[in-house]
Image (cartoon, grey):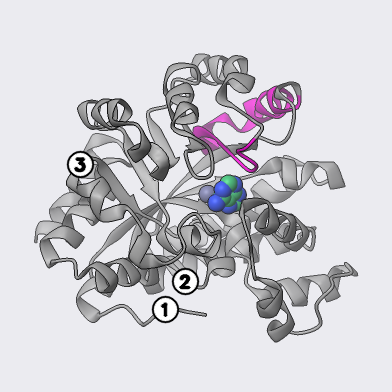
Amino acid sequence: MSSIAAPDWISSLPKAELHIHLDGSLEAGRMLQLAQKNGVELPYKSVEEVAQAYNFTDLQSFLDLYYMGASVLCDEEDFYHLMMDYLLQCKANNIVHTEIMIEPQTYLPRGIGFEVFMSGFRRAMRDAADQWGQSVLLILSLLKHTSEEECIQVLEMADAWRDDFVALGMASTELGNPPEKFARLFELGKQRGYELTTHAGEEGPPAFIWGSLQVMNVTRIDHGVRCLEDPTLVDYLREHQIALTVCPLSNIRLRVFNAMADHNIVELMQQGLKVTINSDDPAYFGGYLNDNFCAVAEQFNLSQADVLTLIKNGFEASYLRNERKAYFLEQLSA
Ligand SMILES: Nc1ncnc2[nH]cnc12
Ligand SMILES: [Zn+2]
């Protein structure tokens, strides 16, 4: 399932990751361990059975297993491990800066409050910062399949944790949940000073990318690969240098494209768009960030200059303060 190991020259470059769902980094071994510890019933008994089940036909078929997987997370220590497991992958992949989507609506309905998961996340982030200087920003990611009213309630709950989140984002089921559904939510997010991003144009049409830009006022688009169907939209994205957080292995596993050879990432780059590479849900899609870079570089025979551009785009499109961006970009050219 995993792609070929990334060549050393890609692995060794410092990178930023801008599109990662923390629950999507829950590895099968950890999931089974926590299920046993917390007495949660899962339809799998082994890592092999989990791997067999991860045979997705579209986004929804993945989301059903993804939310079931996250149901094993219960206490502060579980959330510590979830975060720490991913941050250790950051260290291994040379991801020096990461922007992680946290999805409270996956935990809140089970009576798990912000204080429980945020305590575990904060503790792991502190340990990783102390031990190897890991840079992390968190994105408050709300779920499109829920009502705007529910999302607003969660946004209000997050007021007490406002300093922990740099941005407001949205994920989950795209089809049937157009950007207009969340106009008020994003207006409230903007008033609170969040950076704004959302998933759009993964399965949904270019109109959903337009709506995300014009109604939700986002400045970054998660996925966005369907933008090529609308040349006027491509012009707009280029002119405003709206970054796309593209997730190549995810797109293949969720059948947005049939095979890596059919992926449009090279065309997106040739169109002058600000493309970044990310892993989305690495435990489910067979690879962390280096695997994603490698899969694309191999398939399209990318030059070192192309790979460097993709990596630079990651830092430039990040929500880091300008001095921190400059610091990381300098490290890259050293
Ligand atoms: N690829 C994806 N698209 C939408 N929602 C998601 N949640 C986790 N992964 C996702
Ligand atoms: Zn995603």
Disc 1: residue Cβ within 8 A of ligand 1's nearest atom? no
Residue shown at the point (50%, 29%) measured from the top left: 208
Disc 1 and disc 2 in contact, CB within 8 angstroms: yes
Give the SS element for disc 1.
loop
Q: Which residue is mark 3?
A: 271
- Point out the frontmost of discs 3 and 1: 3
**Residue 294 percent across, percent down from the top left:** 31, 72
Looking at the image, tell me whether mark 1 or mark 2 is earlier in sequence order.
1
Magenta stretch encompasses residue 207: no
Crowding at dot 3, Cα within 10 Å, few <14 / some 14-19 / many 20+, comes out as some
Looking at the image, tell me whether mark 3 or mark 2 is earlier in sequence order.
3
Q: Amino acid at mark 1?
A: Ser
Left or right side of 290 for 33 = right
Residue shown at the point (66%, 32%) measured from the top left: 176
Disc 3 to disc 2, C-alpha distance: 27 Å
Left or right side of 203 for 328 = left
Residue 33 sits in which quadrant?
bottom right
Give the SS element for disc 3.
loop
Crowding at dot 2, Cα within 10 Å, few <14 / some 14-19 / many 20+, comes out as many
Magenta stretch encompasses residue 169: yes
Q: Amino acid at mark 2?
A: Gly
Q: Which residue occupies the foreground of this view, 147 or 319?
A: 147
Q: Which residue is mark 2?
A: 287
Disc 3 to disc 1, C-alpha distance: 27 Å
- Point out the frontmost of discs 1 and 2: 1
Depicted 156 relative to depicted 19: above or below: above
Left or right side of 227 for 305 = left
Q: Which residue is mark 1?
A: 3
Q: Which residues are magenta?
A: 150-175
Q: Which residue occupies the foreground of this view, 255 or 24?
A: 255
Disc 3 and disc 1 in contact, CB within 8 angstroms: no
Give the SS element for disc 2.
loop
